[in-house]
Image (spheres, grey):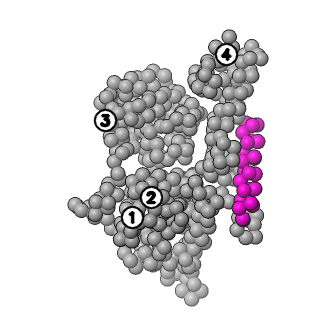
Amino acid sequence: MYNILVVDDEPLICKGLAGLLNASGLGIGKIMTAESGEEALDYIRLEEIDLLITDIQMGEMSGIELMHQAKIVKPWVQTIIISAHETFQYAQMAIRLGARDYLIKPLNSDQFLDSVRSVLLKMDKPLPRTEEALAGGHGDFRMEEPLPESVDSLNRLLEVAVDHPDEPHREQSFYESIGIAGPYFAVIKVRLALGRAAGEMAFPEKDIPLMQYASLNIIKELLDHELNAQVFYAPDRSINILAQWSEETYAEQTNRINQLEMIGRSMHHHIGKYLKIGCTVGISQILKGLQFVNVLSRQADKAMLWAREHGDYHVFYYGDFSWHNYARDPNADELSSQSNRIVEQAKAYIEENYSQKGLTIQEVARRNHVSPNYLSYLFKKITGFNLWEYVVKLRMEESRNLLLHTDLRRYEIADRVGYESPEHFSKIFKKYYGVSPSDLKK
């Protein structure tokens, strides 16, 4: 059973689409509706959402921004965009973020349900290449793997700077011939749990190449519409990914690190789901210049070192750690101190700004110079609260105080504690305290 969230700033459209879904006979569990991006994000943070159906133009937060933030919180959430505008730029942005469909208003009921049915049917099916790989590669399926010489050259690029004083351009020309141009690069490394360390499932040696092959297929499938990247085997049975951006693409895109982390989390999720093996993902920063790819490779390796300290976290970004504060890699006590400092700073910022409408995890993370995912993980680990649950806790405590000790109306209290919609405020309040605001007031 799937949970669906319908988002539109026109209540009648929300109601109509929810009615269509309820009467569709599809395997749907809960259908939730929201009338703003901010309200929708609360649902995504606090509920298990499988499919997001959102309008593209809604007040302060557009459907594109909602989709982007939803992907950061839960990268496996699927999205269908609906719009009154048949604008190529909007459609291009939506597809780039992974939207499964882009429907134009006024919606045709059959077309809408066909789109939803198509997305739901694909959710539990293994990725096609993975299914073929695990079946032994039978049928017409053939996937081109990088040629051995290309793999060797790409791995060498990750180990050694390309420019040499005697022939500065020879190697760069060769890499351009195999599709490496840049000029902006990042390195992602996926270390598969294939029985090399304590706690990992031990696979028979004969099965390991198949697991690598299937993992490579999953990663390629996920990257097809997400990133311009070379994916290849590493010498240590890991998978290496060399992501690249042209000058034009780099200038167009924002939140590139968030995109890389989202991809990393999707890879971890899908490899675990389809292959039943764990993996650790290390992500470098982004640098300009082919000569820095080996530096980026070391960054990805270094990021994965923190798996030793954070065994329940799986996607590590090099920039989340204050390497410059230490002459050597920090020990466990120093790492713990750094983590506590990040969380305390985040708490202080939230306590000052929880009543701000449209407050996002991204904003809190940016103030702390860490990624939203890493901040969310640390916050939960240290405080016991999900970061957004802490925001809700502060909002609910303040609203209860205002209800009991002032004559402010519900909509005024909702506005004071950061909610756009009094109705949404009431839903959250009742879920939190078990009674409605009006019943508590009585």
* Of marks 4 and 3, the one in the foreground: 4
Label 2 to label 3: alpha-carbon separation: 34 Å
State which tag comes first along the sequence, 2 or 1.
1
Which amino acid type corresponds to the residue marked 4 in the rendered image? Leu
State which tag comes first along the sequence, 4 or 3.
3
User: Whole-percent x and y of residue 161?
Assistant: 57, 78
Q: Going by the picture, which residue comes out furthest to the left?
A: 139
So how many labels did they put on this image?
4
Residue 265 falls left or right of residue 340: left
Helix, strand or loop at label 1? It is: helix
The answer to whether the residues at label 2 and label 1 have Cβ atoms under 8 Å apart is yes
Viewer-proximal residue among 281 and 118: 281
- Residue pointed to by mark 1: 211
* Of marks 2 and 3, the one in the foreground: 2
- Residue pointed to by mark 4: 440
The answer to whether the residues at label 4 and label 2 have Cβ atoms under 8 Å apart is no
Label 1 to label 3: alpha-carbon separation: 35 Å
The answer to whether the residues at label 1 and label 4 have Cβ atoms under 8 Å apart is no
Which amino acid type corresponds to the residue marked 1 in the rendered image? Met
User: Whole-percent x and y of residue 33?
Assistant: 48, 27
Q: Judge the density around disc 2: few (<14), some (14-19), many (≥20) Cα neighbours within 10 Å.
A: many
Viewer-proximal residue among 180 and 219: 219
Examine the rendering and report whether any part of residue 62 can be seen: no
Q: Judge the density around disc 1: few (<14), some (14-19), many (≥20) Cα neighbours within 10 Å.
A: many
- Residue pointed to by mark 2: 277
